[in-house]
Amino acid sequence: MQAILAVTFPFFALVLAGYLATRRGLLPEAAIPGLNTYVLWFALPCMLFRFGAGLPVAQLFNLPLMAIYAACALLLLGATILLTRSARVGLKDASFGALVAVFPNTGFMGVPLLVALLGTAAAGPVILTVLVDLVLTSSVALAIAQLDGHRGHGWAAFGRALRGALTNPLPWAIGLGALVSWQQVQLWAPLAKAVGLLGDSASPVALFTIGAVLARAQRVGNETGKPTPLVDYLPVAAIKLFIHPLLVLVVGLNAMRLGWPVDRFSVIVLALAAALPSASNVSLLAERYGADNGRIARIILASTALAFLSFSGAVWLLT
């Protein structure tokens, strides 16, 4: 366990550093969009491109693993909406709450963390989850959220959400890396060095940015003046940290027993990816779509704070 904490502690410490720097005013909130832009459009694409270019294409687009992870995400998404919708929580807010219950912070945190813990063999399954969540899970959740007050426009809403997902640079970076791997192309050495420098900066800057985004989301949520009862957000954080990884693990292991062409290591990587805290960028989406961002921010904060112990425990149990 000590060896696991030695790896996980620095990752969560950087998140805390970004959170405290923003709360204390050392990092102006006006700088957060710039940090997000740098991570999303430069550093993370280079990191994912390098992983994609260094892996066989079959590992990046393992259809049985994709099916397992996607089925669990969609099942839990629907179940969380049904369980959390109430007089206080409408369909839109329930949909965004369900999205943070099934969308782990894989891009900003999970890829570098799981590779550090399990080696480069973990990169393929983790990157696969990024593709599923960015393209499918988020699109379905946003489509359901837009049905609130607009009955009968589900496919149109899904189409809009899917088009939005396809403007994200991360899937394209993964796809370009896969193309380079497939064609066995070698980048020009100076260009490869530049890509490497940007990719190496992704993890620390992304983790610091997570903390900054969480601090900003908490401040915006507090300014709404609406107190959020514990029952409206803590159970969703528990679903994210405990039910989601357990569901992925059970479905994956049973798929193995049924003869699906998946291996135990990949299933464990999927389960650990699901055990990560909620994706912090969902708070930005909630704000953009007019959902209760205070509630979403509290779910993300709770899952991130608790994940240091819960995720470390999951790694200890499964590896």
Image (cartoon, rainbow, N blue to C red):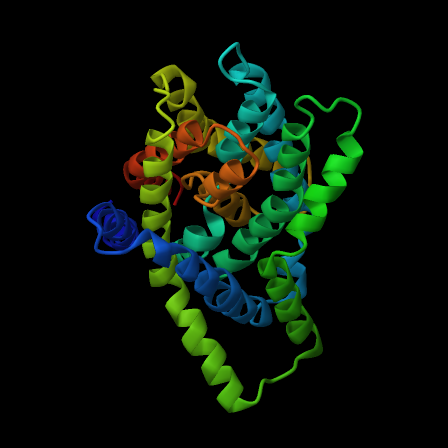
Farthest top residue? 87
Q: Residue at x 49, y 90 (%)?
A: 190
Q: Residue at x 38, y 28 (%)?
A: 224
Is residue 119 visible in the rendered structure shown here?
no
Asked whether, in this view, residue 195 is left or right of residue 116, the answer is: right
User: Which quadrant: the N terminus?
Assistant: top left
Viewer-closest of 162 and 260:
162
User: Which quadrant: the C terminus?
Assistant: top left
Q: Residue at x 42, y 42 (%)?
A: 276
Give coordinates of residue 103: x percent, y percent.
Answer: 52, 39
The number of discs equals: 0
| In the depicted structure, whether residue 234 falls above or below residue 67 | above
Give coordinates of residue 166: x percent, y percent.
Answer: 68, 54
Asked whether, in this view, residue 162 is left or right of residue 10, the answer is: right
Farthest bottom residue? 189
Asked whether, in this view, residue 58 is left or right of residue 299, the answer is: right
Give coordinates of residue 96: x percent, y percent.
Answer: 54, 31
Give coordinates of residue 312: x percent, y percent.
Answer: 31, 42
Viewer-closest of 20 and 149:
149
Viewer-closest of 51 and 35:
35
Viewer-closest of 130 and 275:
130
Q: Residue at x 68, y 21 (%)?
A: 149
Asked whether, in this view, residue 224 is left or right of residue 266, the answer is: left
Is residue 145 visible in the rendered structure shown here?
yes
